[in-house]
Amino acid sequence: MTSATQPSPAAGPFASAPGEATLDRISAVRVSLVRLPLHAPISDAKVLTGRQKPLTEIAFLFARISTEDGHEGIGFGYSKRAGGPGLYAHAKEIAPELIGEDPSDTGRLWQKLVWAGASMGRSGLTTQAIAAFDIALWDLKARRAGLPLAKLLGAHRDSVRCYNTSGGYLSMPVEQVLENTSLSLSRGIGGIKIKVGQPDTRTDLRRVRAVREHIGDDVPLMVDANQQWDRTVAARMGRALEEFDLTWIEEPLDAYDSEGHAALAAALDTPVATGEMLTSVAEHTDLIMNGAADFIQPDAPRVGGITPFLQIMALADHKSLSMAPHFAMEIHLHLAAAYPRATWVEHFEWLEPMFNERLELRDGRMIVPSRPGLGLSLSDQAAAWTSDETEVSG
């Protein structure tokens, strides 16, 4: 692990001029690269088709922002498989841009950070690195207000329906998947999602049937093909899966095939869900405006944080879409609670060792915590998994 303290840059043209409305200033920014090991290698359809190797760890970029008045916020982004060191390197480069700024100016600071790395683009790695800072700024804002983030944004509910994904991977035999579903439901989780997309579609259908018979007709069930079907297979499998009364079919096609998703959504009774792999508001706009999803699944760390996520929420609401944010329940619980239409949040217990707090599950729902901000603090285990760290101060 390395640590460095760098001086802040001179105020540039995008720095806010001092005024009565500027109540505080950012005094320090710390960025950390944390590697979370998984208990066992995880495989979905991308592994079975040979496109990826089994997932063994997740790299997290943490940002901690402190102000002159003693306020602090925590945010994070992540990368599965390659990309973590790249996120960290870009974050180190742009972190000095925040020193001396008013932490309340979330929209302007997002623009400042994206323009700092604009030659690398406005999606992908550059915006995912910004996400950690943006989420930390929103966490700080809510903490300073003494409110849970959901309440700061304007909550429509104090709990959100939740479903489990981590117990339904293709690397698990069906007997283990059934055992995992029972455990999830006993913990208070409301729905079950399992992975599909095997080379032999009959195997997928047998696994789905086994899970449906195991949990009964009243428990919501979803499937996720992780982009591994072409249009023909997706149409055939969509029709074959209709009998199981699924809540949705997730990522049946390539993430950028908005035309194909739109045609499939129009042809099937089962709702189509997608969007998790997209990394900008513009990409989500194309998806939404083409009618390519019944459930939109944005991921705040992937699209650049809460600031752009709120833009996606507004457009999805305008188009009367349901929403089920991808992964990172610790962040997305608050955002889902602030969405006016039907929402789900995805339960993954993988991140729990990195935080001192736990989210409460009750009667099929995840409860919005009463703690200010995201309601999270980093654990000693997160510190032990930190492989590199840099601090910038004024």
Image (tube, rainbow, N blue to C red):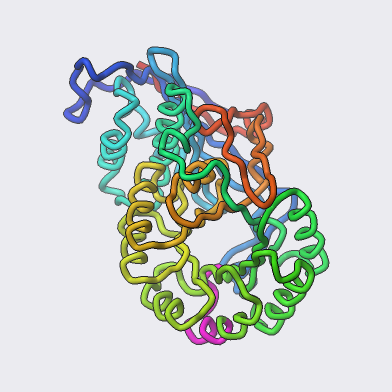
Residue 233 falls inside the magenta stretch: yes
Q: Is residue 320 above or below residue 75?
A: below
The location of residue 280, given as percent across then percent down, is: 35, 54
Please give the name of the residue rendered at 40% of the width and 50% of the height, measured from the top-left corner: 303
Which of 287/50 is in front?
Answer: 287
Please give the name of the residue rendered at 33% of the width and 56% of the height, measured from the top-left corner: 315
Which of 291/340 is in front?
Answer: 340
Quadrant location of the C terminus in the rendered image: top left
In the rendered structure, the answer to whether residue 26 lies left or right of residue 2 reads left
The location of residue 175, given as percent across then percent down, is: 83, 67
Quadrant for residue 279, please give it.
bottom left
The location of residue 246, given as percent across then percent down, is: 61, 72
Residue occupying the far top of the picture: 69
Please give the name of the residue rendered at 46% of the width and 41% of the height, measured from the top-left corner: 155
> What are the residue bounds of the magenta stretch?
226-237
Q: Is residue 387 above or below residue 247?
A: above
